[in-house]
Image: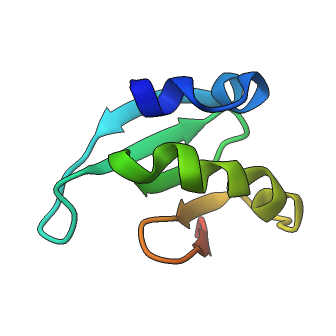
Amino acid sequence: MSEFGKLSTPLRHAVSEIVWSPDAQNAQRLKLYMNDGNQVLISADDLSKKLRYYPGMVAQLDKPGQADLQVGAYFTPYQ
């Protein structure tokens, strides 16, 4: 929650739900459901550093999908 509190107010308001979702590759993985219909996979300890790139990333997209910001930045549109 301390990482979430470091985000700008508009970015905090863009997040609808946060789900703790660890897997074999990332014990700190979170799945964020965004108000714009996208999902974001991100490490809890990198939340405030990496989520700030999300608005610029989705501004270039024409379809909703899943952004993976765990290592680098990848976007996969929903099928």
Q: Residue at x 60, y 30 (%)?
A: 15
Residue 50: x percent and y percent?
57, 56
**Along the line of sight, which residue is nearer the eye, 22 or 44?**
44
- Coloring scheme of the render? rainbow
**Along the line of sight, which residue is nearer the eye, 36 or 3?**
3
Q: Residue at x 48, y 41 (%)?
A: 32
Residue 60: x percent and y percent?
88, 67
Q: Quadrant of the C terminus?
A: bottom right
Residue 45: x percent and y percent?
35, 48
Q: Is residue 39 visible?
A: no
Q: Residue at x 71, y 33 (%)?
A: 11
Specify whether 43 is left or right of 3: left
**Along the line of sight, which residue is nearer the eye, 66 or 14?**
14
Q: Is residue 2 above or below residue 62?
A: above
Specify whether 35 is left or right of 27: right
Residue 59: x percent and y percent?
88, 58
Q: Is residue 70 above or below residue 35?
A: below
Q: Is residue 54 above or below residue 11?
A: below
Q: Residue at x 56, y 52 (%)?
A: 49
**Along the line of sight, which residue is nearer the eye, 77 or 23?**
23
Specify whether 45 is left or right of 37: left
